[in-house]
Image: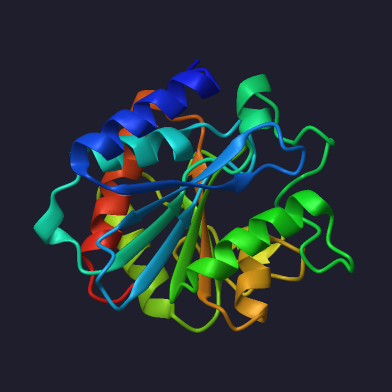
Amino acid sequence: AMSFESYCEELHRICALKKFDLKEAGLDAYAQYPLYRITVNPSAKHTICLTAGIHGNETSGPLGILKFLQNYQAPRTQAKLIIFPLLNPYGFTKNKREDRGNLNLNRHYFEKPQPKAVKTICDLIKQARPDFSLSLHEDDELSCFYIYQYGTNNESSSSIMDFIGRRAKVCRDAKIYDHKAVNGIIKNPAFDGTLDEWLHARNMSDAACLEIPDSIPLKKRVDLIAQILEFIAQKKTA
């Protein structure tokens, strides 16, 4: 497994090589690790926000972002991309789902006050003001891709799932866990307090959460994510 230090070194190397704007956007809630933000194609009007590594043991998202950045070809991108590649560095370091305070960083967004670790993430993404946001997660039970969609932007989730369906297995069941689903898309699922739900509820962004089956070998997951992100980046509107 890649260490957080090696991840940061690789991120800096790629961003320097490709001349991407890489910033330390802040520190985690325990002021222990940097949280990075990468901006790609800054002059585009339409903004897509990508987040990964909220659950530290779900590594294909952060690694897939590295691969996407490494493969990136400038003229092909229609949107401005604001990328938070690894939002739970402690969990990544320890191969652990939760953060240092044992908090699931994909819950608690509607609590008042928000836990500090959750508020830290909200403050970062609020500054991005995205039109569409996508978070990358892994599922360790199902062997197929599916997506949670918050908001009315059906076209974006449908096109993403069509793209994936030509390369990997999409969940086709009418129910995924307890949620009604069509072609791997769960629309506006019941309240569970996630980041994506919060973004949509605050009218900040149409939001989606892509679940990647971790039964696929890691290298293939990383390659697929890089392809999916390239596809999303090439669309004029997400």
Can I make out residue 177 in this image?
Answer: no
| Residue 30 image point, x, y percent | 77, 37
The residue most toward the right is 112
| Nearest the eye: 160 or 22 | 22
Note whether 24 is above or below 200 in the view shown. above
**187 left or right of 48 in image:** right
* Rendered image quadrant of residue 189: bottom right
**206 left or right of 229 in image:** right
| Nearest the eye: 91 or 30 | 30
| Nearest the eye: 139 or 131 | 131
The image's colouring method is: rainbow
Q: Give me the residue at 46% from left, 40% from top.
A: 61
Note whether 40 is above or below 56 in the view shown. below
* Rendered image quadrant of residue 157: bottom left
**196 left or right of 225 in image:** right
The C terminus, quarter of image: bottom left
Looking at the rendered structure, the number of numbered marks drawn on it comes to 0
Q: Give me the residue at 35% from left, 43% from top.
A: 225
* Rendered image quadrant of residue 203: bottom right
| Residue 234 image point, x, y percent | 20, 63
| Residue 40 image point, x, y percent | 29, 56
Q: Give me the residue at 44% from left, 80% from top.
A: 153
| Residue 26 image point, x, y percent | 60, 48
Can I make out residue 121 in this image?
Answer: yes
Q: Give me the residue at 55% from left, 80% from top.
A: 151
Note whether 135 is above or below 125 in the view shown. above
